[in-house]
Amino acid sequence: MRKGRLAVVLAVLLGSAVWPASQDSVVNSPHNLSVSGPGPVKSLSESEVCVFCHASHRAGVTPLWNRELSQAVYITYKSPTAKAQPTQPTGASKLCLSCHDGTIALGRILSRQTPESLSGSQRIRDRKNLGTDLSDDHPVSMVYSRAQSGKPGTFKAVPLQGAPVTLDENGQVQCTSCHDAHSNRFGDFLAMDNREGRLCLACHSLKDWAASTHNISTARWNGRGHNPWPYTPYEDVHSNACANCHSVHEAGGKEHLLYYNQEAENCYSCHNGAVAHKDLRPDFEKPFRHRVEAAVGARPKPIGRDFQVTRVGCTDCHNPHASGDMEATPPNASGALKGVSGMAVTGAIAEQAQFEYEVCFKCHSRNVQYSVTRPVRRLRMLSSLREKFDPSAVSYHPVVAAGHGASVPSLVAPRSATGLISCTDCHSDDSTAPGSPTAIRGPHGSKYPSLLVLPYETGDMINESQEAYALCYQCHDRQSIISDQSFSEHYRHVVRVRAPCSVCHDAHGVSRSEGTALHNSHLINFDITVVRPDPASRRLEYTAEGFRKGACFLSCHGNNHSPHSY
């Protein structure tokens, strides 16, 4: 009787094929390398299941380990934003790597004098062979409390109450924190179902994630192109959650465990018309665009804070953990910009941009030593758009605050002199023209210079038309302009003399350091490639002389104003 009971116990401990196994037992998993194993790699003769990892009478490495430990020196995970760096693998991770780094044959077990012969391969293949370079894998042998204390807002508190995810006796994250080697119930030997990112969110805490599009969207892959979720069994954005962008093993973008090293490629996986409704890639292939293809490799600062404008990436304007579909009225930031840092009009860093222009100012401001490329050479030049749009500026388009002028008769309803506009009213995808069925709002790319949504001719001697100045005419009524309702000489200058709007007007504005209310109201800032100083007075300036009155000192198209009054 005693002997019979011992046989039963050994059958349980060693996984003998005579003992019935439940669906989540190691017996029915790829970790069963015995002759009864269900996978393509298994022993040609060994009937014991557990022997490939454990020996029932062996002193030494816990838990009764039956394999050699790899002597490899590993390249460990590193990230510029990580607060706790992993060490060389220890504990359970070291045990797992005795198979999964590919340096030791699967059939080499300590309790057998000769390696077991296996069908298939003696080395783990594909993604399951992690190799000795672990820099593209989720960090292990890392003290969790150190990461949590360094970034308390992004990690759950220790201990992880009630979670299947566990830390080892030293408080470290190990392979066994996420994987249960004895149960393949959830696939990939995961400790729990990772649908909706549940496994990831057992440790990671993401502000605004609950309402973000990448959490709540039920969009599915329509079968076009490549599968955006090659390593998960889930079928929509909501279910894949973190796995929409992140790969826990063999990540192409190592530092943030992204599928691809080029940041934009991670976005294109879904935003190519195969999951998301619209295809963004064509916009970023247009001649005038934000060059997101340059954002490769590690981002030196957290999401939305990288001011290196030569490497601008999608996450400088969008936080994939927070962004949503909420529309907004100017100047408020839309849901697509939620959770992204910005620069306030004062020059201070805003941890979360409240206004659309704050995201733009992050690069288009003198504070970050970036000079906007000017298509027009003006009498007074300043690179900082933040200063041009400042409410204390001499004159400006009403992006940050309502304009100084109380009367603008040319405005097309419902626009008014007290209303505001957004940067993206002028700078956006050129397909967002009114009535376009393929509109993708946002300054991704355009066929027009300066990333404009509509044509805006700035060369000299332009034949006036609705098309030539379509950008201006989307807000300013063409008939009002050429009938001189706001300025008595518009028709003469724009139609007869063929001087474009840009010869006299600086579309963004004129800052306090560029001019004064006397000389630069109404966005007056001359294009000096067309307008020259008046030869008689040697002056090149406009002077305001009251409501819709002024005088110009200049020479233009062979006409000298010495001055010419209006």
Image (cartoon, rainbow, N blue to C red):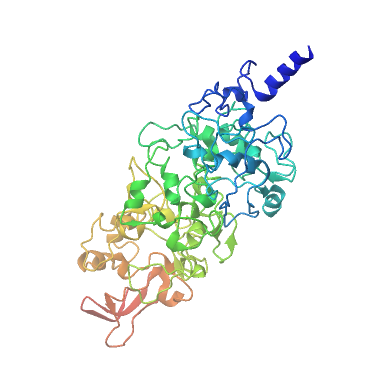
Q: Is 84 rendered above or below residue 370?
A: above
Quick check: can you spot residue 363? Answer: yes
In this picture, residue 434 sits left or right of residue 253: left
Q: How many marks?
A: 0
Identify which residue is drawn at 59% across, 25% down. Answer: 185
Give the image location of residue 76, x and y in percent: 58, 52
Quadrant for the N terminus in the image: top right
Among all residues in the image, which is located at the extreme right? 2
Give the image location of residue 195, x and y in percent: 57, 31
Q: Is 518 rendered above or below residue 73?
A: below
Q: In which quarter of the image is residue 166?
A: top right
Q: Nearer the viewer, residue 379 or 226?
A: 226
Identify which residue is drawn at 29% across, 83% down. Answer: 534
In this picture, residue 450 sits left or right of residue 295: left
Quick check: can you spot residue 483? Answer: no
Q: Is 565 rendered above or below residue 146?
A: below
Among all residues in the image, which is located at the extreme front? 113
Q: Which of 348 and 473 is in front in this view?
A: 348
Quadrant for the C terminus in the image: bottom left
Give the image location of residue 216, x and y in percent: 54, 35
Q: Quadrant of residue 61?
A: top right
Give the image location of residue 235, x and y in percent: 48, 30
